[in-house]
């Protein structure tokens, strides 16, 4: 009996080892990271008029490529609707999903997925035409509401209207562009999604200033990258790519000064940048994995400011997405 148990235990360890190495080996073999993104959400993942993918979700994928290959350009993007995103990840069509996806218990426990952390803290908002005359969501009784099917948006808006004893009609579409086009054409009174998404989609309207974002935030929407369960090594790489960018901002190292910081004698800095210890090797990467992320992509503050910050068309203040040192929620475990 003990012999059988030992054999099963050894087999289990061997199986776990093969699972753990699968995605990283796959990625190295094909020479790029395959990243699932949205079908076009300015500031997060958007295919611009120059034929380039841009956005904070895109930069996260570029950071993984920098960690694995030392080259942030070794990444390819697969645009996915909300409905098809999890199937694409589960089937192996993509290696990581970085598509303004809300971390929920159901998704974490029932879909075979692991969230690598929170890339952007958000909450669901609503937009209405100015001519509707509404200044609060409590004034929307009987409204037609445009939503993206396959998202937490549908459940949140349903819960909100029912809890406030208001009637409503959902008008659901699979593709994000279909939702905003229907709203812009007057097929519904309200457009709702994550508040950051509302700000991004508003820019697509013919006359953005003819529409206002209502003050209510009706949900918690922690948005983050996702990988498949069963591959701890790849999960660790996904987690620590994000953690490295958050820690880098906290420690004051960015793409402009990283080479100089490599000379630092600060123990925390040395561990982050790989001049001390073998933290990269323990994940199957080179020890300068985090230095490559920072040098080629930037720290968290840099990718935030570049893509969605106050000086971009979205004009999103840091708020809860600021470093914990500045009163926000961005806080990463230490590298040690």
Image (cartoon, rainbow, N blue to C red):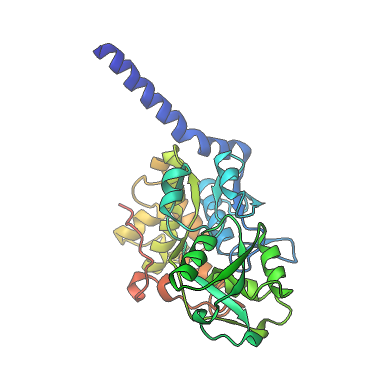
Task: Please identify the quarter of the rendering in which residue 163 is found.
Answer: bottom left
Q: Is residue 53 left or right of residue 67?
A: right
Whether residue 13 is visible, yes or no, is: yes
Question: How many numbered marks, from 0 up?
Answer: 0
Image quadrant holding the N terminus, namely top left
Query: Foreground residue, 175 or 190?
Result: 190
Query: Foreground residue, 49 or 148?
Result: 148
Q: Residue 194 in the image: state x and y as whole percent.
A: 53, 68
Tell me: residue 13, above or below residue 263: above
Q: Residue 23 in the image: state x and y as whole percent.
A: 52, 38
Task: Please identify the quarter of the rendering in which residue 93 is found.
Answer: top right
Q: Residue furthest left?
A: 2
Task: Please identify the quarter of the rendering in which residue 296 is found.
Answer: bottom right
Q: Residue 219 in the image: state x and y as whole percent.
A: 44, 68
Q: Residue 229 in the image: state x and y as whole percent.
A: 45, 40
Q: Is residue 178 left or right of residue 17?
A: right
Tell me: residue 116, above or below residue 163: above
Residue appearing at x 71%, y 75% in the figure: 186
Query: Foreground residue, 94 or 17?
Result: 94
Whether residue 307 is visible, yes or no, is: no
Residue appearing at x 54%, y 52% in the figure: 66
Q: Is residue 222 left or right of residue 46?
A: left
């Amino acid at each position: 009996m003990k012999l059988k148990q030992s054999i099963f235990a050894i087999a289990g360890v061997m199986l776990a080892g093969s699972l753990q190495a699968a995605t990283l080996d796959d990625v190295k073999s094909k020479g790029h990271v395959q990243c699932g993104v949205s079908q076009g959400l300015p500031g997060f993942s958007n295919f611009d008029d120059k034929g380039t993918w841009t956005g904070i979700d895109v930069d996260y994928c570029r950071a993984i490529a920098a960690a694995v290959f030392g080259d942030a350009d070794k990444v390819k993007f697969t645009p996915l609707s909300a409905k098809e995103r999890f199937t694409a990840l589960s089937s192996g069509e993509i290696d990581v999903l970085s598509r303004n996806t809300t971390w929920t218990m159901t998704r974490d426990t029932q879909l075979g997925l692991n969230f690598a952390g929170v890339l952007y803290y958000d909450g669901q908002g609503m937009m209405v035409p100015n001519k509707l005359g509404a200044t609060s969501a409590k004034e929307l009784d009987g409204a037609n509401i445009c939503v993206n099917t396959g998202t937490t948006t549908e459940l949140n808006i349903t819960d909100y209207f029912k809890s406030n004893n208001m009637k409503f009609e959902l008008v659901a579409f699979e593709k994000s562009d279909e939702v905003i086009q229907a709203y812009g054409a007057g097929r519904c009174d309200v457009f709702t999604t994550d508040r950051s998404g509302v700000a991004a989609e508003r820019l697509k309207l013919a006359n953005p200033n003819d529409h206002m974002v209502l003050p209510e935030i009706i949900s918690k929407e922690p948005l983050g990258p996702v990988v498949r369960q069963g591959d701890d090594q790849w999960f660790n790489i996904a987690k620590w790519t994000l953690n490295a960018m958050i820690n880098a901002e906290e420690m004051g190292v960015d793409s402009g000064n990283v080479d100089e910081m490599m000379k630092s004698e600060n123990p925390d800095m040395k561990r982050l940048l790989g001049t001390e210890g073998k933290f990269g090797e323990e994940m199957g990467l080179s020890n300068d994995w985090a230095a490559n992320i920072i040098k080629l992509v930037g720290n968290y503050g840099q990718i935030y400011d570049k893509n969605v910050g106050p000086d971009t068309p979205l004009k999103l203040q840091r708020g809860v997405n600021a470093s914990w040192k500045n009163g926000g929620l961005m806080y990463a475990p230490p590298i040690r």
